[in-house]
């Protein structure tokens, strides 16, 4: 009981994070020398108390659904308690945090997944601690917290201070890393965005008599936000109080309003296409033209669809709204900065999609410069739910080192920087962040900082799984495992050596490295920037980098050479295919130093700088034509280069 109360208390507010570091110690003592059955039941009961105190707000939506969810989620607590007792009670200090991380990962994926209140989320306001999330995600923070809990238990039970020393070393390293990351200075401001918090009570959202009130509220707040001259205005999830295609008169009215204010608008709406309903985000240009649409990919079970409907028809009584169809594509929206030709991409996470680390990571890996979360948490009243939801957004920003912009119907709305700081939040002037109407405008930096986690993903899960299996086998079958260990270490050493040789830095290096100034071409013969005009309707799909002739050209990342030949337009050129369907192209080379199908590492010299392949004029300056393409689509190279 004490464990459950401490743990639930740590999730009730961002200021109570300290309790998570000791919350499991009472449970560990209670489980000491217990039978497997008693350990499971005791842990299961602890889970019931914890989840009842954490997701209590679900009662505002469905009492039966809340009860079933609590009983289900508590099974993971029971499993945890069962596996840390006999026969694994002596498996060592690393076994417990590894097991907890694996169980949290399973909870986040089984039966569509529910990664709510992950242990690491309790630290969202503890900024120095959570910076390590850019290395291995929220899982690493969960691992560290559980390691400290297990260390305290071992120190108290076995009277050995070395366990606390180990924990202290890890915390110290974590804090040092956090301080270094927090001291990083953000580049100059780039894109100006306004978020609107309508504060529409849930009982009015779909009330036909409230439609005028809702639209007028959003129009009023948007008109005030327009005075800040933003590049983009964002409304929350399902802000339009109708199904867009079913009652087009309201959509047409919105389009007319957007034309009046002459500002791009992103808004949420339920859409109907071919009889299927979608929870969508839509982007209107300042001329009122529909530019892009994103349909929610990860739906809320019992909220937006009913799982196992055919097998368990009684579940229909649990869902508060009708079925929504799942989207299919990771849509990236494009926005242009005011007065400039530079375009930026962003991904949208609707409702609780921001609690899934892999969704946010996919958007960033596909080229998103920042993330947007539009949501409606009015369902749950004035509870801790809004802040528990905010915690997930903070981690998505830190994990991917991008800004995350939130527009929530009743809060919390605002801007989270790549270090997880809440830069600016909508409030009523007295510190209240939820259930208050308002707007906020902020300028955000779009200089992406590629993260280790963004590139390698959930590798920590594999590490924890390996530790679990190895520690369990070594504890139960010590002699046989020693031989396996020696062979495994040998294989691992060979693999590590190969992987290190071809390992990349976290960013794309510059393809030219010499003791002069690298200049992006811009002269009387044309503009060498990405997307600039060429002859006729052609657009420049890369950048031209001035450099002396025969300057070595480097592979920006490791990969495989897919082309190394000569063409009329590009002269000698090389194409290298990298991971994540990214290719880099190097043109106008004086010589090619690689061959097709050759594997190259980052920094490998693939050729030297030459002149334009089809230019006869001797006045053409030596330069490298450089492109980056993702899934065959040209990308702005300067966004990728270090």
Image (tube, rainbow, N blue to C red):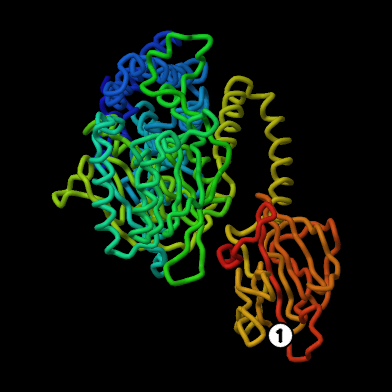
Question: Which part of the image, by quadrant, shows the N terminus?
Answer: top left
**Considering the numbered disc 1 on the image, is that residue within a helix, a strand or a loop?**
loop
Expressed as whole percent of the image width and height from the top left, the position of residue 446 reads: 46, 62
Q: Which residue is mark 1?
A: 548
Which of 380/599 is in front? 380
Q: Residue furthest bottom?
A: 619
In the rendered image, the residue lying farthest to the front is 249
Q: Is residue 639 left or right of residue 159?
A: right
Q: Residue at x 39, y 46 (%)?
A: 252
Q: Is there any visible trace of residue 354 in the rendered image?
A: yes
The residue located at (74%, 91%) in the rendering is: 619
| Residue 483 horizontal/vertical position (percent) | 71, 30
Q: Is 340 above or below relative to 224? A: below
- Left/right placement of residue 232 relative to residue 91 reads left
Above or below — where is 191 with respect to 439?
below
Q: Is residue 109 toward the left or the right of residue 42 in the image?
A: right
Badge 1: few (under 14), some or many (20 or more) residues near its Cα, within 10 Å?
some
Indicate the position of residue 365 as horizontal and vertical percent values: 57, 50
* Vertical arrangement, residue 8 with respect to residue 235, above or below: above
Give the vertical position of 296 relative to 451 (above or below).
above
* Residue for point 53% across, 50% down: 332
Q: In this view of the protein, which residue sits in the foreground, 329 or 66?
A: 329
């Amino acid at each position: 009981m004490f464990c459950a109360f401490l743990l639930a208390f740590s999730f009730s507010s961002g200021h109570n994070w300290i309790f998570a570091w000791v919350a499991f110690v009472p449970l560990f003592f209670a489980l000491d020398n217990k039978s497997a059955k008693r350990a499971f039941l005791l842990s299961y009961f602890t889970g019931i108390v914890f989840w009842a105190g954490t997701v209590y707000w679900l009662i505002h939506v469905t009492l039966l659904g809340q009860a079933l969810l609590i009983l289900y989620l508590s099974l993971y607590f029971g499993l945890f308690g069962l596996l840390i007792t006999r026969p694994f009670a002596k498996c060592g200090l690393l076994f417990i945090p590894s097991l907890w991380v694996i169980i949290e990962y399973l909870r986040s994926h089984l039966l569509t997944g529910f990664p709510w209140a992950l242990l690491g989320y309790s630290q969202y306001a503890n900024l120095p601690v959570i910076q390590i999330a850019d290395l291995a995600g929220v899982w690493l923070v969960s691992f560290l917290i559980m390691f400290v809990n297990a260390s305290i238990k071992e120190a108290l039970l076995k009277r050995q201070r070395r366990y606390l020393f180990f924990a202290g070393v890890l915390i110290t390293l974590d804090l040092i890393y956090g301080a270094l990351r927090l001291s990083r200075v953000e580049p100059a401001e780039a894109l100006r965005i306004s978020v609107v918090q309508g504060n529409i009570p849930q009982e009015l959202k779909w009330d036909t008599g409230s439609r005028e009130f809702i639209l007028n509220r959003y129009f009023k707040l948007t008109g005030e936000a327009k005075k800040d001259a933003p590049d983009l205005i964002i409304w929350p999830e399902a802000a339009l109080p109708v199904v867009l295609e079913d009652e087009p008169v309201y959509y047409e009215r919105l389009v007319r309003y957007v034309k009046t204010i002459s500002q791009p608008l992103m808004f949420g709406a339920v859409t109907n296409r071919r009889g299927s309903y979608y929870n969508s985000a839509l982007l209107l240009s300042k001329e009122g033209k529909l530019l892009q649409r994103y349909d929610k990919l990860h739906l809320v079970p019992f909220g937006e669809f009913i799982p196992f409907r055919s097998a368990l028809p009684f579940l229909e009584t649990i869902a508060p709204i009708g079925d929504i169809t799942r989207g299919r594509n990771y849509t990236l929206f494009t926005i242009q900065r005011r007065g400039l030709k530079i375009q930026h991409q962003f991904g949208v996470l609707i409702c609780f999609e921001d609690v899934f680390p892999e969704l946010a990571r996919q958007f960033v890996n596909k080229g998103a410069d920042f993330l947007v979360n539009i949501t409606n948490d009015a369902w749950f009243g004035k509870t801790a739910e809004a802040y528990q939801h905010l915690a997930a957004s903070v981690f998505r920003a830190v994990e991917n080192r991008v800004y995350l912009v939130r527009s929530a119907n009743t809060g919390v709305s605002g801007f989270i920087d790549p270090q997880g700081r809440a830069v600016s939040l909508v409030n009523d002037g007295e510190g209240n962040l939820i259930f208050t109407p308002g707007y906020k405008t902020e300028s955000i930096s779009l200089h992406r900082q590629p993260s280790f986690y963004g590139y390698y993903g959930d590798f920590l899960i594999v590490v924890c799984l390996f530790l679990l299996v190895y520690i369990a086998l070594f504890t139960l079958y010590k002699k046989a495992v020693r031989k396996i260990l020696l062979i495994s270490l040998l294989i691992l050493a060979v693999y590590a050596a190969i992987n290190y040789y071809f390992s990349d830095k976290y960013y794309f290096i510059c393809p030219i490295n010499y003791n002069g100034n690298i200049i992006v071409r811009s002269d009387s013969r044309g503009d060498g920037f990405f997307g600039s005009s060429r002859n006729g309707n052609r657009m420049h799909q890369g950048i031209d980098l001035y450099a002396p002739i025969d300057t070595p050209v480097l592979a920006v990342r490791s990969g495989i050479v897919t082309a190394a030949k000569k063409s009329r337009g590009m002269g000698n050129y090389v194409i290298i295919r990298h991971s994540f369907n990214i290719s880099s192209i190097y043109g106008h080379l004086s010589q090619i130093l690689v061959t097709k199908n050759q594997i190259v590492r980052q920094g490998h010299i693939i050729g030297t700088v030459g002149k334009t392949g089809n230019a006869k004029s001797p006045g053409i300056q030596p330069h490298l034509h450089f492109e980056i393409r993702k899934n065959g689509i040209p990308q702005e190279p300067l966004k990728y280069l270090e």
